[in-house]
Image (cartoon, grey):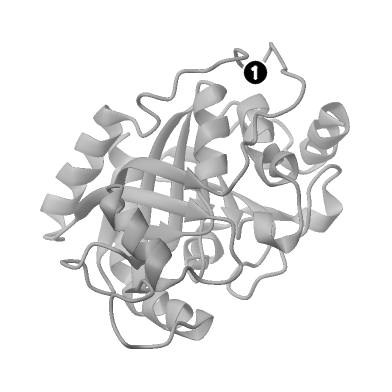
Amino acid sequence: MMKDTLDYIETYTDGFKPEIGIILGSGLGELADKYCEFAIPYDKIPGFAKSTVEGHKGQLVFANINNKKVVMMQGRIHYYEGHSMQDITYPIKVMKKLGVKTLIITNAAGAINKSFRPGDLMVITDHINFMGSNPLIGPNDDELGTRFPDMSEIYNKNLIKIVDAAGRLLKLDLKHGVYAASSGPSYETPAEIKMARYMGADAAGMSTVPEAIVANYCGIKVIGISCISNFASGVSTKKLSHKEVIETTNAVKAKFTDLVLLLLKNI
């Protein structure tokens, strides 16, 4: 399947070799629209599952940004859509084969840390996998990585320093924290969020962890950035909705875009 995928992508790329990958989360796809040189819809790429969630356009976008060749997932594929862990992380393996060495993963997340507010940007320092599965289950591809990969530094410390420096230049109050991922699609209960806080989580979401695991397994350096789009369940009395997620990410997309552009310049 991988050969079919790469052969099809090559009919578009004509030798374009991306060095940086970006996964654009809910409501954050405008960066791809602005810099797109050419795009391939997921449903046309052999081996790719289709993204069905509002705020996720569902295409692979290629661009030159700040003299860097970039491939962007304009919208991700989620576990809760009914796809397997292997399906949702297949694009990461494709990125590795295309030549990607650094992956920027973004998402919208709910604040567990009570000092966080909607509109904050959080640099992910580590994660907790509450999804009930692991994308590396199954036969191992020794060409991509080892059977039992180390996960002690999934989110690259040097990249965190670079994004922090970019944040200071832009006068952004970047937060740092641990991202907890559940399978979704229902939001967590107040008791689940309370448990996650006791375990050290600062933000909650339904993505990122499988992609980060596979990227690290493949030897790709990872940086994760969460847009805090709402308070997690029980942190406030407000009911949770995807509409609020999209509204908040739309409100902060300018500063998010500025941060990613400066990060790309300095990687």
Task: Residue 48: tell me if it is visible.
Answer: yes
| Frontmost residue, 34 versus 146 | 146
Up the image or down, 169 lies above or below 194; here it is above
Q: Quadrant of residue 230?
A: bottom left
Q: Is residue 97 left or right of residue 219?
A: right
Location of residue 243 in the rendering, given as x and y in whole percent from the top left corner: 50, 85
Task: Residue 257: tell me if it is visible.
Answer: no
| Frontmost residue, 221 versus 148 | 148
Q: Which residue is mark 1?
A: 144
Location of residue 111 in the rendering, given as x and y in whole percent from the top left corner: 31, 66
Say which amino acid is labelled 1. Leu
Up the image or down, 224 lies above or below 107; here it is above
Residue at the extreme bottom of the image, as rendered: 238
Location of residue 118 in the rendering, given as x and y in whole percent from the top left corner: 28, 75
Say which quadrant the N terminus sits in: top right
User: What kind of element bears circle 1?
Assistant: loop
Q: Quadrant of residue 173?
A: bottom left
Q: Is residue 155 left or right of residue 11?
A: left
Q: Determine the residue positioned at 38% across, 74% down.
A: 233
Label 1 packing within 10 angstroms: few (<14), some (14-19), many (20+): some
